[in-house]
Image: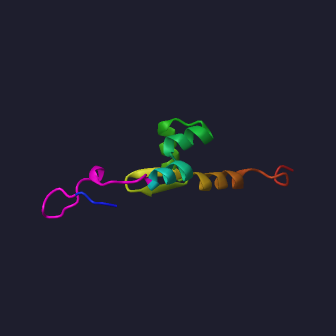
Amino acid sequence: MSMHFVDDRRAPAPYEAIEMHGNPQSKIFNDKTVSVPEAGQKYFGLGRAGSYAAANRGDLPTIRVGRRLRVSVVALERMLEEARPTSRDST
């Protein structure tokens, strides 16, 4: 990977100027996590405000990466599976 520099002092250029061959973060964010509003809508039929309220209460398993707040799909599906009543519970 080659680096581009802004001036003689060898300071790296802004992020956009650095050559990147694919963005591994985008694959992780797209496959393993979803946005808070997307999780709320898809799994519970919530709107944007309701989704963030659920995340703030801890009802959605969130992961903070920098300023991003994401919902772990695996953790959410596990949480829903554990909450599902089994045939023994319904008698």
Q: Is residue 27 above or below residue 1?
A: above
Q: Write down the region rendered in magenta.
A: 5-23
Q: How is the image coloured?
A: rainbow
**Residue 66 locus on image (x, y percent):** 38, 56
Farthest residue in the left direction?
A: 8
- So how many labels did they put on this image? 0
Q: Nearer the viewer, residue 74 or 45?
A: 74
Q: Is residue 59 visible?
A: no
Q: Find residue 3 and report its image quarter.
A: bottom left
For residue 70, side relative to residue 11 (left or right): right
- Quadrant of image for the N terminus: bottom left
Q: Position of residue 72 (x, y in %)?
A: 55, 53
Residue 20 versus residue 44 in the image, above or below: below
In the rendered structure, the answer to whether residue 12 lies left or right of residue 24 reads left
| Magenta residues, dominant SS class | loop
Q: Residue at 24% of width from left, 57% of height from top?
A: 4
- Confirm whether the magenta stretch covers residue 11: yes
Tell me which residue sits at (30%, 60%) in the image.
2
What residue lies at 44% left-to-right and 56% top-to-bottom? Answer: 64
Q: Nearer the viewer, residue 7 or 89?
A: 7
